[in-house]
Amino acid sequence: MDNKHFYITTPIYYPSGKLHIGHSYTTVAADVMARYKRLQGCDVMFLTGTDEHGQKIEDKAREAGVTPQQFVDDIVTAPGGVLDLWKLMNIQYDRFIRTTDDYHVAAIQKIFRKMHDNGDIYKGSYKGKYCKPCESFWTESQLVDGKCPDCGREVADAEEEAYFFRASKYADRVRDLLLNTDFLEPRSRVHEMVNNFIDCEGGLQDLCVSRTSFTWGVPVDFDPGHVVYVWLDALFNYMTALGYQNDKYSDLEKFWPADAHFVGKEIVRFHAIYWPAFLMSMDLPLPKKVYGHGWLNFNGDKMSKSKGNVVDPYLLSERYGVDALRFFVLRTFPFGSDGNFTNELLIQTINTDLANDLGNLVSRTTAMAEKYFGGKLPGARQANPELDNSLVSLVTGLCSRYEEQMEKFQFQNALEEIFKVIQRANKYIDENAPWALAKDMDANGVRLGTVLYNLLETVRICTVLLTPFMPDSCGKIFAQTGADAAARTWDSAAKWGVLPADVQVHKGENLFPRIDMAKELEELDRIMEEAKKAALPAIEIEPQTEEKVDFDTFCKSDFRAVKVKDCQQVKKSDKLLKFTLDDGTGTDRQILSGIAKWYAPEDLIGKTLVAIVNLPPRKMMGQESQGMLISAVHTEKGEERLNLLMVDDKIPAGAKLC
Ligand code: MSP
């Protein structure tokens, strides 16, 4: 990488449903990297976008009764959609590409034609196993237990006339790239790729790169009926967004080859095998790095259906702040491995790192500066090498230790370096006991000022380096600790003594309040329960019975209008009401009905109801019931509802219903 330019990408997202916290993992990581490089003074291009073609989108649009374009427009731009989520997560991308953008579509057509002209794309017929959700064809030997090796779902036999990309031609070069360079990281993913897809039985297979079974894709302009396979279309976004094969942009020279493609582990195959092979075919320089990160799992599954945890990024950020979320995902799990997301772990991380360690350090330091010096430190200094040196040397070396980890995308380790310093600084407060020094300001005032200055410098340097992770909170810490623009730069993070000697602090709001774990988990449970209820259908009605009843049998049921003379709750039963009814015979009829949950007895007196009167009498709670009252039942938001059938009061008691 030259030091001036930095080009980083995330995968482009399928706008096919609601995004959860796991989806934001790649993008938060890439945003942190982009901000870090900007901090270092690089000219950064951070690209993200949406992958909008393919059968899955066509199917979903049909289900929703809209055109595919309307469908993707809505998911990309609607509240809660992709753009909205990136705004919420404070993602500062430089460019956003949509694969339905005209310039991209035209560029893909040109690319496809060029590969066809150079002989790397040829026409054949495809027989294979197709996984619809992944839009991937598989050979029999690639299936795992007969299912899609990526997502584990059912695959179906498929055959169609199709164009193929001669991937086999590039097998040796790709193998060499993977084994003998650091193109793909973590290195643990390299052997999996080489063994499963290149050195497997039959070697690297040519890739089917067109489809005829649906139309929502980039049309192959020289062969109507074919659309370009979604992965060929999608992968080239990384170059078309810079102006490759189009005039919309002109940044190719500046930014290509990319410094890093961040991708989830399930799409490493496309980025580490086919993407370089496509580029080799087009004689283009290869990206410098593909980094395949792990998944945020939710009880062992990447596809969150919540499973006992609140995973909605809107709700989580409303409760804890976006910065805490951004911080959490990179602090808690090593970037290359999977991690299990739980609300408990999130709260624990907030409490330990942000409230206890960082928050405490900032609030104690600023509070003491205000209390002992009215906010403005005295200019004079009195060092105590025995107490100061180990802190100062730890802090001044931090920037380079952090940089070493950031360059390897080891966010967790970079943060660990910062938090070691923060913990050391909290210990430094205890070692120096400023409250004891403050007892005799004449004798110890200068030393006390020095202790606080050392703490402020420590906070400043840590905050510069935390800025890519928590930009808003760090801005607030700078404001509280008196760090002006010059004290917030990358260069200043490697220097001690940048704050003016008589720095002015302003103690402000507590940035990371401690969360009561037990109460909060209870509250989250309640929220989930409510969300579950809200997701239930408004009204559910029992399906009609298929089984037929013959007319004569039906006619045997004797339905009559009855008037309620009296109605009372049955003693010792919270379900039953006892009705005394006028059924037109002159003798009262008693019916018991389990409807106490829905009616107060006194409200029913005088009403005209419908009863079936020729059922054999039966005993309930020791009392006889002579028939049954007819009600309408349905379910509302998961709760059973019942309404007695009430008819016009003009209808006389005993009138037959038929
Ligand atoms: N459209 C393709 C990418 C094409 S790139 C040329 C795609 N899209 S996706 O929307 O399904 O996924 C986008 C990214 O989100 C992927 O990197 C994927 O790994 C990541 N994640 C989705 N769920 C995730 C977790 N639960 N955890 C971490 N990352 C996750 O793939």
Image (cartoon, rainbow, N blue to C red):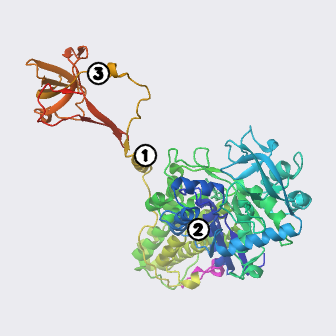
In the image, what residue occupies the spot 21% across and 25% down?
611
- Prevailing SS of the magenta stretch: loop
Between disc 2 and disc 1, the foreground one is: 1
For this rendering, which residue is in front, 505 or 156? 156
Q: Where 36 sits versus 344, above or below?
A: below
Instruction: Classify residue 206 by image quadrant.
Output: bottom right
Q: Where 365 sits versus 585, above or below?
A: below
In the image, what residue occupies the spot 73% across and 81% down?
4
Measure the C-alpha gap from mark 2 to mark 1: 33 Å
For this rendering, which residue is in front, 313 or 548? 548
Between disc 1 and disc 3, the foreground one is: 3
The x, y position of residue 470, in whole percent, is 55, 68
Picture quadrant of ligand 1: bottom right
Q: To which residue does mark 3 refer? A: 555
- Quarter of the image that includes the N terminus: bottom right
Find out whether residue 490 is within the magenta segment. yes
- Quarter of the image that includes the C terminus: top left
Outermost residue, left direction? 586
Give the magenta-colored segment's residue range.
488-500
Visible in this render: residue 3?
A: no
Measure the C-alpha gap from mark 1 to mark 3: 44 Å
Q: Amino acid at mark 1?
A: Lys
In the image, what residue occupies the spot 75% across and 50% down?
137
The x, y position of residue 194, in whole percent, is 85, 52
Q: To which residue does mark 2 refer? A: 469
The x, y position of residue 25, in whole percent, is 61, 60
Crowd tier of the residue under label 2, counting other residues whose Cα lies within 10 Å: few below 14, some 14–19, many 20 or above? many
Between disc 2 and disc 3, the foreground one is: 3
Visible in this render: residue 148?
A: yes
Q: Amino acid at mark 2?
A: Phe
Q: To which residue does mark 1 refer? A: 532
